[in-house]
Image (cartoon, rainbow, N blue to C red):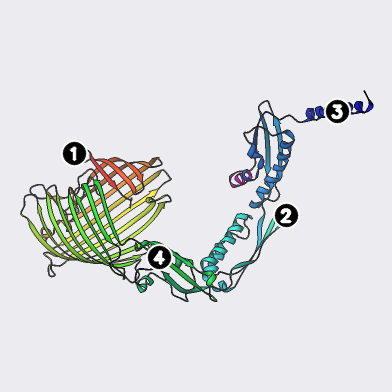
């Protein structure tokens, strides 16, 4: 063997030995499971610690190599301190320990947040046109940053966001912060906040262009609640978009400010619409225990002319009652809130021992005021009717009426037909005079209320009530449609439809001069789309207030469908235990 070969062999042997040494010195992976815990904080502080602590990504998994575990554990100390700073804790102390057994390696963090930093001074300065804006002055009082409070970075960011949002909403398009900072003095746990906000000038509405409109432009402009030159406000544009989309004239609606085309402080607005189908047909079967099987046929002409007049007609056929009406609707000065209508209606009802046919023509003025609605109506009606085997009568009445409603609701976020909390209050007055196209004089008043209250996501309380009274010169001449009846799905469950009230000599219910109905119900969510209910209803109609009240009790199931609750109830009269349990099926919102 030559020296050179011996040298190469020596190099190879040394290399192999070095390789074996390196392999032998590589750390072995720990086969235990990692468990990471911390103590000393809770609530929002604990949640933020969890989001910052990288080591938690390995929690419940195989323990990393020992050198990496020690590195991540030390890094966690700094991460936890950083996680506490947004809550005003700049003097926190964090320590950790690592312990192991045969199966688990535990990293435990001990956290002492220390004293909280408080806001000692707020340097808030507003410049620009917004200094004369009352809404901005009000916002200053509503900002979450308060002197003396603990420094929360979330409050600081939310305050900045509130200023930016209000500026954008009210047309301060050039608004900006000229200074925004937090200065923390660690020595005495104090903070000074500087927010200098320059709103710039406020923009105004410029020219409004309307594209692809199939209706008269002057009519469409009645939906606008702003004029060129008015101060800009995004709420006006949002209200316009909602009003046009809800008018049923258009399939699509797009309302947008054209900031890039602003002329000075005037920003033009673009309104783009596409026409809806002019004619709309509907057909729908249904069933209700008050009406039996039913069929609805409808035809709507969404616009009769370019001034937005509409025609709506419906024919409802059922085992108990057949109804047909035609409604001609004329938009008012503010079409989204005001409308006038001319209605013709025929109602033919044969149920139990009551047989009647009603013909009615009316004109109506309806107005909406946010949560309020009021309706004035003038109607003439002629009704041909018979109770039991009594002789058939015909009556005619000219009836002016007024109705007022107040509605407040909190909807389910996923389905607007499901109500979490809310109420509806209604009052109605109507009357007639025998000196003006009427067979008798009368004055009728009625009040009704419904309420839904959620104790928590599972339990709800539902209550409703109605009272009414009629003063009349001759009750016997009032047709059935002008009298009070009780009983049925939406009245006193456990009794058939309109089968509570005064009776004639044959025992046929002829209605009453006074009405009282009340209901209390609790329901419980047993599954995401199902509730069960327990209820009791009270009520009756009669010729005087001292009429006997009937009470029923019942249970029910509710399926929370996309079109509202589908209710299946069974109820029985307490006062008449021999009366069988009665089934009730209804569909629709609780209010």
Q: Tag 1 or tag 4, which sits nearer the N-term?
A: 4
Q: Rounded to the nearest whole Å, what is the CA distance between mark 4 and mark 3?
A: 84 Å
Q: Rounded to the nearest whole Å, what is the CA distance between mark 1 and mark 2?
A: 80 Å
Q: Nearer the viewer, mark 1 or mark 3?
A: 3
Instruction: Provide the residue designation for mark 2.
Output: 186
Instruction: Provide the residue designation for mark 4.
Output: 273
Q: Tag 2 or tag 3, which sits nearer the N-term?
A: 3
Element under label 3? helix
Q: Quadrant of residue 334?
A: bottom left
Q: Rounded to the nearest whole Å, what is the CA distance between mark 1 and mark 3?
A: 106 Å
Q: Tag 2 or tag 1, which sits nearer the N-term?
A: 2
Where's residue 6, x and y in %? 91, 25
Where's residue 109, x and y in %? 68, 39
Give whichever of 525, 315 is nearer the camera: 315
Q: Is residue 573 visible?
A: no
- Magenta segment: 39-49
Q: Which mark is residue 579?
A: 1
Q: Tag 3 or tag 4, which sits nearer the N-term?
A: 3
Q: Residue furthest top?
A: 1
Kindly check if marks 1 and 3 are in contact, taking CB atoms under 8 A apart as contact: no
Dot 3: few (<14), some (14–19), or many (≥20) neighbours within 10 Å?
few
Please state if 257 lies on the left or on the right of 26 as rendered.
left
Q: Rounded to the nearest whole Å, what is the CA distance between mark 4 and mark 1?
A: 59 Å
Is 439 contained in the magenta span? no
Give me the residue at 22% from left, 47% from top.
488
Give me the residue at 68% from left, 42% from top.
111
Instruction: Provide the residue designation for mark 3.
Output: 12
Q: Nearer the viewer, mark 2 or mark 4?
A: 4
Q: Residue furthest front?
A: 2
């Amino acid at each position: 063997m030559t020296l050179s070969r011996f040298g190469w062999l020596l190099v190879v042997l040394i290399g192999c030995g070095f390789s074996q040494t390196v392999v032998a010195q590589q750390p072995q992976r720990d086969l235990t499971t990692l468990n990471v815990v911390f103590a000393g904080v809770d609530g929002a502080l604990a949640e933020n610690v969890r989001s910052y602590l990288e080591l938690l990504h390995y929690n419940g998994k195989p323990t990393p190599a020992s050198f990496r575990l020690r590195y991540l554990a030390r890094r966690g100390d700094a991460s936890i301190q950083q996680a506490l700073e947004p809550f005003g804790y700049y003097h926190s102390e964090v320590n950790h320990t690592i312990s192991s057994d045969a199966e688990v390696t535990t990293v435990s963090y001990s956290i002492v947040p220390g004293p909280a930093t408080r806001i000692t001074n707020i340097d808030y300065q507003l410049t620009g046109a917004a200094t004369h804006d009352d809404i901005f002055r009000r916002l200053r009082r509503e900002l979450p940053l308060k002197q003396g409070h603990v420094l929360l970075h979330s409050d600081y960011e939310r305050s900045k966001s509130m200023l930016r949002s209000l500026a954008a909403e009210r047309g301060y398009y050039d608004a900006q912060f000229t200074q925004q900072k937090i200065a923390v003095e660690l020595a005495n746990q104090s903070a000074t906040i500087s927010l200098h906000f320059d709103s710039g000038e406020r923009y105004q509405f410029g020219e409004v262009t309307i594209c692809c409109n199939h209706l008269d432009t002057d009519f469409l402009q009645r939906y606008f609640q702003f004029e060129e030159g008015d101060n800009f406000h995004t709420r006006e544009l949002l209200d316009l978009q909602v009003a046009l989309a809800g008018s049923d004239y258009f399939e699509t609606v797009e309302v947008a400010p054209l900031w890039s085309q602003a002329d000075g402080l005037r920003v033009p607005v673009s309104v783009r619409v596409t026409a809806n189908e002019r004619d709309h047909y509907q057909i729908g079967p249904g069933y209700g225990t008050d009406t039996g099987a039913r069929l609805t046929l409808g035809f709507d002409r969404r616009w009769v002319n370019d001034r937005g007049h509409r025609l709506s007609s419906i024919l409802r056929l059922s085992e108990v009652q057949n109804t047909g009406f035609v409604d001609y609707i004329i938009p008012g000065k503010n079409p989204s809130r005001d409308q006038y209508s001319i209605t013709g209606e025929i109602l033919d009802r044969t149920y139990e021992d009551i047989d009647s046919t009603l013909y009615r023509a009316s004109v109506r003025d309806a107005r909406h005021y946010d949560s309020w609605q009021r309706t004035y109506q003038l109607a003439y009606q002629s009704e041909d009717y018979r109770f039991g085997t009594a002789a058939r009568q015909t009556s005619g009445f000219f009836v002016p009426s007024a109705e007022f409603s107040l509605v407040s609701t909190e909807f389910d976020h996923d389905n607007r037909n499901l109500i979490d909390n809310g109420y509806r209050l209604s009052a109605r007055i109507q009357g007639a005079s025998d000196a003006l196209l009427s067979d008798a004089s009368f004055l009728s008043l009625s009040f009704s209320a419904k309420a839904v209250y959620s104790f928590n996501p599972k339990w709800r309380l539902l209550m409703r009530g109605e009272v009414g009274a009629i003063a009349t010169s001759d009750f016997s001449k009032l047709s059935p449609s002008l009298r009070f009846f009780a009983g049925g799905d939406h009245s006193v469950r456990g009794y058939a439809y309109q089968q509570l009230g005064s009776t004639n000599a044959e025992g046929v219910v002829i209605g009453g001069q006074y009405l009282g109905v009340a209901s209390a119900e609790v329901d419980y969510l047993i599954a995401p789309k199902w509730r069960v209910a327990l209820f009791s209803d009270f009520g009756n109609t009669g010729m005087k207030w001292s009429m006997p009240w009937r009470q029923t009790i019942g249970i029910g199931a509710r399926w929370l469908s996309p079109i509202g609750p589908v209710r299946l109830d069974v109820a029985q009269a307490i006062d008449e235990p021999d009366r069988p349990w009665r089934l009730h099926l209804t569909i629709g919102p609780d209010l």
